[in-house]
Amino acid sequence: MNVPNLITVSRVVLALATLALLYLPAKENQQTLLWTAFVLTVLVIWADGLDGYFARKLNQATKLGAILDIAGDRAVEMAYWIVFSSLGWIPVWVPLLFLVRGTFVDAMRSQASSEGYTAFGAKTMMQSGIGKFLVASNFSRFTYAVVKALAFCLVIAAQTTMLKDSWAQPTAIVLVYLSAAFCLVRGLPVLLESKGLFEKPSAS
């Protein structure tokens, strides 16, 4: 296993270990556990770009690495939403929305990959200008990532005694809903434009 792939797998393991802290029955140390989970979540988010950086730096970019990167991102994302929902911090429809959207979008992207297209970049499967902007543009991808990152961190921070009855609670929920909205807005163009993949001969 090369360095980028090791980072990807390690990030998923770190995310699961971080979320496990939220279930530990330690009332006396609950605040410490919450803030520890908050700090580790920041680390998980920061590590998101490390695999790609080292893949380019060490010239270790591979097709397996690209697949692992997408799978790792999806696993981390779903783990956070599911855990937050199971703890009663967010509505259950949020992880269900991400699950259904992710399943169908990933299926379409898998078909696109077999046709020689990519999700992003010069060979993106998106054809329309609005589709390219919403799905493949750096602006859209960066904004979506930032909103989700802030949501993950603030949902945890909002459970602490320091921030529980403050601006953090409503702000965290707003960020969660914004993440859900982004999820839909960025997923629909993929589903709508992917029909073209089934209407023409395979690129192979």
Image (tube, rainbow, N blue to C red):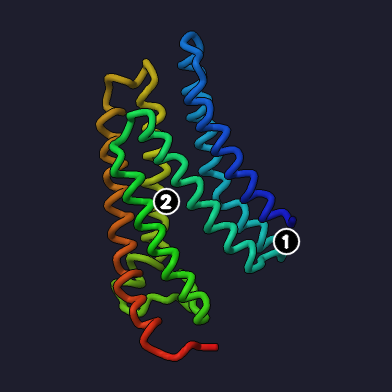
Question: Between residues 49 and 24, which one lies in front from this camera angle?
Answer: 24
Looking at the rendered structure, the secondary structure element under dot 2 is helix
| Quarter of the image with the N terminus in it | bottom right
Characterize the local packing of mark 1: few (<14), some (14-19) or many (20 or more) Cα atoms within 10 angstroms.
Answer: few
Characterize the local packing of mark 2: few (<14), some (14-19) or many (20 or more) Cα atoms within 10 angstroms.
Answer: some
Q: Outermost residue toward the top?
A: 28
Question: Between residues 167 and 61, which one lies in front from this camera angle?
Answer: 61
Residue in the image at 47% along x and 23% along y: 34
Question: Which of the 4 quarters of the picture holds residue 193?
Answer: bottom left
Q: Amino acid at mark 2?
A: Ala
Classify 30 as above or below 153.
above
Q: Outermost residue toward the bottom?
A: 201
Looking at the rendered structure, the secondary structure element under dot 1 is loop
Circle count? 2
Q: Position of residue 152 (x, y in %)?
A: 41, 38
Question: Which of the 4 quarters of the picture holds residue 171?
Answer: top left
Label number found at residue 58: 1
**Disc with the residue nearer the chain's start (2 vs 1):** 1
Q: Position of residue 67 (x, y in %)?
A: 57, 62
Residue in the image at 63% along x and 61% along y: 65
Residue in the image at 42% along x and 51% along y: 145
Residue that mark 2 sits on: 145
| Quarter of the image with the C terminus in it | bottom right
Classify 189 as above or below 178.
below
Classify 193 as above or below 27.
below
Q: Position of residue 130 (x, y in %)?
A: 29, 72
Residue 159 visible from this viewpoint: yes
Q: Position of residue 84 (x, y in %)?
A: 39, 34
Question: Between residues 197 and 151, which one lies in front from this camera angle?
Answer: 197
